[in-house]
Amino acid sequence: MTPIRKILIANRGEIALRIMRTCREMGIRTVAVYSEADRAAGHVMAADEAICIGPPPSRESYLSSEKIIAAAQRAGADAIHPGYGFLSENAAFAGAVAAAGLVFIGPRAESIAAMGDKTAARKLVRAAGVPVVPGSDDAVRSVADVEKFCAKHGFPVLLKAAAGGGGKGMRVVQKAGELEGAFAGAQSEARSAFGDDRIYIEKYLEGPRHVEIQILADRRGNTVHLGERECTIQRRHQKVIEETPSVIVNESMRAAMGKTAVMAAKACGYENAGTIEFLVDRERKFYFLEMNTRLQVEHPVTELRTGLDLVALQIRIARGEDLPLRQEDVVLRGHAIECRICAEDVENNFLPSTGRILHLKSPSGPGIREDRGVEQGGEIPIYYDSMIGKIAVWAPDRPAALARMARALREYELLGVTTNIPLCRFVIGHPKFAAGEFTTNFIQEEFFPEALHREDEALEVAAAAVSAFMASEELQPPPGSSNGTPPPAGTRWRMARNDLLREP
Amino acid sequence: MKTFIVTIGGRERTVRVEDRKGVSVDGGEWLEVRRLSATEYSVTTDGHIDRVVAVREGNDGVRMIAGGTMIGALVETERSRLLKQYARSTRPSASKMEVHAPMPALVVKLEVEVGQSVTSGQGLVVLEAMKMENEIKAHFAGCVKSIHVQQGKAVEKGELLLVLE
């Protein structure tokens, strides 16, 4: 057993906070790292210690392996938790952490490398008997290589970054004319996101669903799966809404996918928490897509359905403990849904929205969990991902969970930056979503900004009244008035009744 | 008494605000509007109270949430309207030729040079915000007259990127 008393969290935003919360519950001290853009960020305030690691661009701060390891050593941390994104799937970083005598809370560097190179991963799991989507065995070097593949397999195809995931450096190509631009765009985005511009091709399955399996493995190779997460609702290959269970997965399919996921994990000698992503076609056949060798954004839905704390289990595995549960101990209960709340303008081509949060009131009440890294008054900077936080709900069954999520989204008030909350409400309230009939093209096919406009005369009258009231207050500020600010300095509380004063 | 023209969802409403009576929309009943905090308001009619949260957006915009719905409004007075119309009529038509940043971002690539002719739909500048690249394209064919940004620099929303002619 390796004792872990202090963990440096090499991340920012909601995931850094989420990890710190478990650390606090386990009595483990936390160290935050932050860029100059995040000096006042939530994760900095929540940590026991905080160390500035450089200027705002990720490359000079959150992606700087040297600076992060130096910070961990300076703070006397025993371990580093990478969160998701940034350096979480960087094998060289995991190796450097171990070489520095620190515990990397995640898989071994070799497993990350084996799964991180998407083309090598496909070969590896295929050899272990896991089904994969048809694609190029190796990275392609030029547009000519892509043309060759398309001549054989036909369009549409998907260009993907060999080094990455999360939709970065990914392009769907419908016809030959789009190839050159798509290839250059994918390369450039991959270079900027992963520092590696190798691209490979996959046959693009039409109307697929995206279902993934969460696994946990300890150092001795004990591996369990925690059921699936349905992640089909995406936009530009970025997940928006996730849920568990999936409406298309029944008991036997879950067992088959779980077994396959465990096989894939064992193929790379996996340790710690990981996720195997599958594409599921119309016949409910599933194909290995990739393995994410880290904690996922959407892990809360699995936590809600299993009652487990995945971060606590990650830490226990990292310090050398055996898995505290066997497959038959995993209990799956009820239904959980998560919406990612992102700063983007869904009515304006999903342009990112940045700025200061001027008003924020989160949903609460039965069955609701919120993970968020920024408070009212906080800034959404341009340098990082647009996700502000996540809302997850649990209920005994899917209809109850949908009603609960609709209620949560209705309660969620955020002003100052534009968010995708209206889009989330649109999907959650859509009859096809409720019926479980959707593919990865759902948003693209069903959503149009005009669909958000509902006419509600009473609300519009109230809104018009408030708008005019605000404008009239601005025209003529009432004397000595507050607008919510405290009384001017110099004002002191006084005892209201002198007869209450007594001689000592 | 002050009178405002409030536009919501393309529909104009005349709103009167009077110190003692309250607020009346399109000549309807008087509503009591109260400010509860810096961003929260209540609107009271007979036996019914609506909660509205609101922040200013730009010079004459208000962004609100009421009943879980996002509502955007434009608030004008007769005077501010006339001023705007006047400004519009005197603004040089060349402004159509200006290309502005639709969001705060980093300029990752300039795809054109001064003097270069471009076709409609051709990429001009690649901006990156929140790890996503967005290519700004020409809305019409023309020639690049001037470039006002540099590669690698950050731009604010609405900042002038380049001018076509």
Image (spheres, coloured by chain):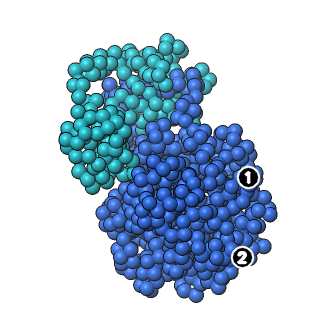
Chain of the residue displaying label 2: A
Name above or below for residue A484 compared with residue A465: below
Q: Earlier in the sequence, mark 1 or mark 2?
A: 1
Q: Which residue is mark 1?
A: A247
For residue A325, the mark is 2
Q: CA distance from mark 1 to mark 2?
A: 26 Å
Instruction: Name, please, the residue furthest toward the right.
Output: A252
Q: The N terminus of chain A appears in which quarter of the rendering?
A: bottom right
Tag 2: amino acid: Leu
Q: Chain B appears in which tint?
A: cyan
Residue at (44, 34) in percent of width and height: B63
Residue at (53, 15) in percent of width and height: B29
Q: The C terminus of chain A appears in which quarter of the rendering?
A: bottom left
Residue at (54, 86) in percent of width and height: A2
Instruction: Name, please, the residue furthest toward the top.
Output: B27
Kindly state the secondary structure of the residue where label 1 is placed: loop
